[in-house]
Image (cartoon, rainbow, N blue to C red):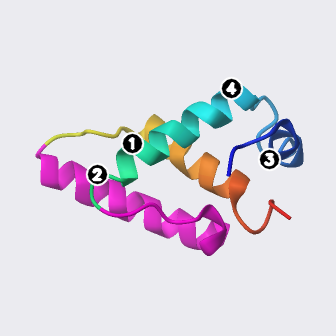
Amino acid sequence: MAPTQSDVNRVSGKYPDYSLAELNADKALYESTCSRCHGLKNPRSRSEEKWGKIVPKMIGKLNKKEGMEVIDARQQAAILRYLVTMGPSTKQ
């Protein structure tokens, strides 16, 4: 599912300065990062709380597997921001 401006508008209270361009960049980062180890999960498949636990764990595994920090804290936050924006608590 392609992000839209309405997705950005829906999370404006949580991410006030978020733009559609950033959301699309975060989506691309999610797709390129998470597909390295497994198939992509539907953002709606997990709650914000669950994504908040899963993403750091998976990024930790990736960084450990690569033997270096492939994804930093800023990028991790961007992936989580995409998943939360497109997830079940915000996407109707």
Mark 2 burial class by Cα count in 10 Å: few <14, some 14-19, many 20+: few
The residue identified by callout 2 is 36
The residue identified by callout 3 is 14
Mark 1 or mark 3: whose residue is earlier in sequence = 3
Which kind of residue does numbered mark 1 sit on? Ser
Calculate the distance from the C-alpha at mark 1 to the C-alpha at mark 3.
Answer: 25 Å
Horizontal relation, residue 58 to residue 77: left or right? left
Q: Secondary structure at mark 2?
A: loop
Q: Are marks 1 and 2 in contact (CB under 8 Å)?
A: yes
User: In this picture, which residue range is highlighted in magenta?
Assistant: 38-67
Residue 43, picture quadrant: bottom right
Check the image and report above or below for 49 versus 74.
below
Query: Depth check: 34 or 50 in front?
Result: 34
Calculate the distance from the C-alpha at mark 4 to the C-alpha at mark 3.
Answer: 17 Å
Calculate the distance from the C-alpha at mark 4 to the C-alpha at mark 1.
Answer: 17 Å
Calculate the distance from the C-alpha at mark 2 to the C-alpha at mark 4.
Answer: 23 Å
Q: Are marks 1 and 3 in contact (CB under 8 Å)?
A: no
Q: Residue at x 79, y 47 (%)?
A: 14
The residue identified by callout 1 is 32
Q: Secondary structure at mark 3?
A: loop
Query: Depth check: 2 or 53 in front?
Result: 2
Query: Depth check: 14 or 9 in front?
Result: 9
Mark 1 burial class by Cα count in 10 Å: few <14, some 14-19, many 20+: few
Count of number-bearing discs: 4
The residue identified by callout 4 is 21
